[in-house]
Image: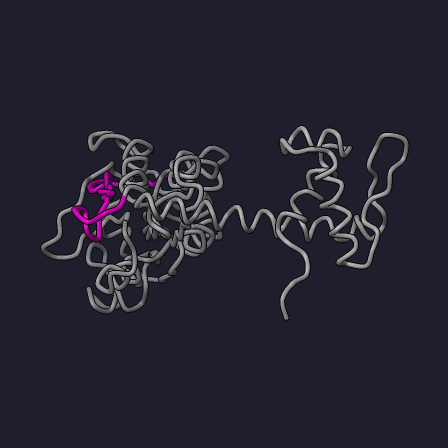
């Protein structure tokens, strides 16, 4: 069954409502007023319902018109999106760009790079995934995304280092380690539970259930927000990105631990392309936006 109404009918109807009169709608559409009136009348005839009534010089929606207006807008806007997407594809723009981000990267850093991308490529779909390192590497090996933000590169791959993410060794102020009057040694740390953010498979592949620096028993969480909450609750100490716990450090819910050695750690955040030479304009623009947002390689992330 073919539709009786046309896209133009709905567009004229929408314009009359937005402009408030047939006369203004005709000027906006650069048509004669009789043509605009005919399109609305034809739409109403095909639907068998009155959508607009004239009160004085103003076009006013009927109750049925109010209900159908949003449907009409969706039809027109959907077609405009299709046309815009077709133009973008004809110009060589990608239909979709996928970005995989390691979970240690604050979401705000990524979001700061997106407004310019949306303005430049409004018809390109964007998929962003925040993943643990093993899951991200699986995506990379399966070639599931165009861009990857990660701290651990696959073997034999070269990425662009954007910045370094500072890690802070922290605990709850009520934790025994936080109350020690002296700098903490490895022996001190070995007596306490460690909270780490990693997949179980990642830890098993590396060194089992023991921390390679302290021999302490590890509790693993696959999300940083969960690991940070566990540390806040006093369940252990841990190394977490400093930029993720600014509020907790400022209000005292977490405190940095004084270590006798090894008190500075950081992760090199790197940008990796699936295929740099074959990348489209939207992918290259997003890569440049991320590079600009995160700063030069020697700029520490804090």
Farthest residue toward the left? 156
Judge whether residue 245 can be spotted in this image: no
Report the residue at 38% width, 41% height from top.
110
Viewer-nearest residue: 218 or 141: 141
Q: In which quarter of the image is the N terminus?
A: bottom right
Judge whether residue 49 can be spotted in this image: yes
Residue 285's spot in the image, x, y percent? 30, 38
Q: In which quarter of the view is residue 193 placed? A: bottom left
**Is 214 rendered above or below residue 121?**
below
Residue 53's spot in the image, x, y percent? 86, 42
* Image: magenta residue range: 255-280
Farthest residue toward the right? 56
Report the residue at 38% width, 53% height from top.
130
Report the residue at 47% width, 47% height from top.
83
Report the residue at 23% width, 30% height from top.
296
Residue 139's spot in the image, x, y percent? 28, 61
Q: In which quarter of the image is the C terminus?
A: top left
User: Is residue 231 one of those drawn in magenta?
Assistant: no
**Is 258 rendered above or below residue 177?**
above
Q: Describe residue 276's horizontal placement relative to residue 18 as left or right.
A: left
Q: Describe residue 168's horizontal placement relative to residue 82 as left or right.
A: left
């Amino acid at each position: 069954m073919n539709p009786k109404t046309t896209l133009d009918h709905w567009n004229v109807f929408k314009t009359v409502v937005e402009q408030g009169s047939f006369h203004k709608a005709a000027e906006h559409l650069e048509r004669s007023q009789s043509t605009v009136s005919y399109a609305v009348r034809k739409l109403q005839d095909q639907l068998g319902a009155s959508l607009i009534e004239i009160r004085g010089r103003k076009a006013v929606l009927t109750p049925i018109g109010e209900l159908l207006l949003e449907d009409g807008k969706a039809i027109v806007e959907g077609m405009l999106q299709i046309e815009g997407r077709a133009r973008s594809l004809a110009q060589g723009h990608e239909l979709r760009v996928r970005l995989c981000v390691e979970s240690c990267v604050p979401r705000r850093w990524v979001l700061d790079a997106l407004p310019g991308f949306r303005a430049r490529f409004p018809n390109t779909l964007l998929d962003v995934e925040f993943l643990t390192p093993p899951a991200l590497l699986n995506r990379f090996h399966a070639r599931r995304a165009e861009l990857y933000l990660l701290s651990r590169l696959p073997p034999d791959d070269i990425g662009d280092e954007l910045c370094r993410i500072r890690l802070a060794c922290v605990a709850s102020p009520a934790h025994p380690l936080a109350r020690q009057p002296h700098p903490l040694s490895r022996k001190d740390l070995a007596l306490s539970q460690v909270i780490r953010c990693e997949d179980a498979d990642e830890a098993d592949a590396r060194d089992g259930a023991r921390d390679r620096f302290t021999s302490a028993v590890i509790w693993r969480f696959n999300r940083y927000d969960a690991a940070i909450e566990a540390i806040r609750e006093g369940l252990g100490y841990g190394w977490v990105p400093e930029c993720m716990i600014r509020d907790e450090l400022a209000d005292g819910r977490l405190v940095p631990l004084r270590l006798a050695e090894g008190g500075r750690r950081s992760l090199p955040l790197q940008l990796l392309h699936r295929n740099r030479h074959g990348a489209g304009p939207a992918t290259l623009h997003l890569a440049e936006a991320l590079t600009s947002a995160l700063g030069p390689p020697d700029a520490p992330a804090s």
